[in-house]
Amino acid sequence: MIDFLIVGGGIAGLSTGARLSQHGKVTVLEAEDALGYHASGRSAALFEESYGPPSVVALNKASADFMHTENGGYLTPRGLMLVGHKGQGEAFEQDVADLNMQVISTDDAQARVPILNPETLGFAAISNAAFDIDTDRLLQDFARVIRGNGGEVLTKAKVTAIRKNPHWVVEAGGTNEARILINAAGAWVDEVAAMAGIAPIGIIPKRRSMARLPAPGGHDVRGWPMMLGVGEAWYAKPDAGKLLVSPSEADPVSPHDAYADDMVLAEGLARYEEMVTEPVTRVETSWAGLRSFAPDGTLVLGPDPADPSFIWVAGQGGYGFQSSPAASQLVADLVIGAAPELDAETIAALSPERLRR
């Protein structure tokens, strides 16, 4: 008998499994050949405490100590710079307030990122509290904790059937029987719920595309901050000496192994090009990921009201990695009956109950 059976081997499932592995036997089932294959493997990998709705910001803040100190820390300084063209003053001010940023001069912005175009750049702001996340090490460390506590992390284990009699029985290449079933299947969480006879919560997968460009103009981009267009119309982030550029789209799609939409990617690259002096001459590679959102845009964490042995860890959107330490701890506390450290208002804002009214 497995105590905690987790469907999904991304950051949501692995972090939750690591927390629960201290309290019983954990088995994680991942359908793909590798862990973190879908959304977790295609993350922008940025930690910014102020990014997200209030309940997410609360999770980010509660995750900060873990991210900075656990196992030597998973964060390295990056910085986040908001840039806007000359007609975006009002929207720029709103973003500055929402992201708790400091306004800087356009000259300062160009000193930090020399390819910014003085003809179009009208506004800039900076946050020095933004960090790159070592996402692969975080995933593997959570998996290592599960295994170290006697649990299993299985790949190529696609769930094909779920029933309850009287415990959860999950078919995934073999038969797994468990007391508690944890649904951390990303874009597929509603499909897993349907197999289990649990009402869906209305998760909407949304595509986000990405292009990897050569370092523009031959610049050394390693020390540049991540750049964000006003209204999150695009972003650009240094990565291994290259530049990742995304159109920041959020187009609803069905759950699938996502790929970039060429037209959407071209539109996003055009918005990026408007703000820089170096044209995009070559895209080295492109890809897309699915970010999954609940109807109200925040995470869904905790037992389903209809069956407390069915646990949701869903709707991470673009906040999964940065919120994972606190989100997983909250789920574990709720499952084992411990008192959560988060405040009651935040817990209610994350609870599946809010979507059942």
Image: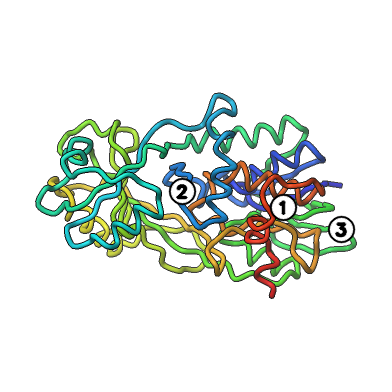
Q: How many labels does the image show?
A: 3
Q: Is label 1 in a helix, a strand or a loop?
A: loop
Q: Is label 3 in a helix, a strand or a loop?
A: loop
Amino acid type assigned to the residue bearing label 2 in the image: Ser
Q: Which of marks 3 and 1 is nearer the N terminus?
A: 3
Q: Residue 167 carries which label?
A: 3
Q: Is label 2 in a helix, a strand or a loop?
A: loop
Q: Pointer 2: what residue?
A: 50
Front label number (2 vs 1): 2
Amino acid type assigned to the residue bearing label 3 in the image: His
Which quadrant of the structure image shows residue 92?
bottom left
Q: Pointer 1: what residue?
A: 173
- Residue 304 lies, in percent from the top left, at 74, 64
Query: Which residue is pictured at 64% across the width and 51% down the height?
Result: 8
- Residue 203 lies, in percent from the top left, at 57, 67
Whether residue 50 sits left or right of residue 18 in the image: it is left
Q: Which residue lies furthest to the bottom in this view?
A: 357
Query: Quick check: marks 2 and 1 in contact, CB under 8 Å?
Result: no
Spatial CA distance of label 2 from label 1 is 42 Å
Q: Which residue lies furthest to the right in this view?
A: 166
Front label number (3 vs 2): 2
Whether residue 155 sits left or right of residue 297 in the image: it is right
Spatial CA distance of label 3 from label 1 is 18 Å
* Label 1: how many Cα within 10 Å (few below 14, some 14–19, many 20+): few
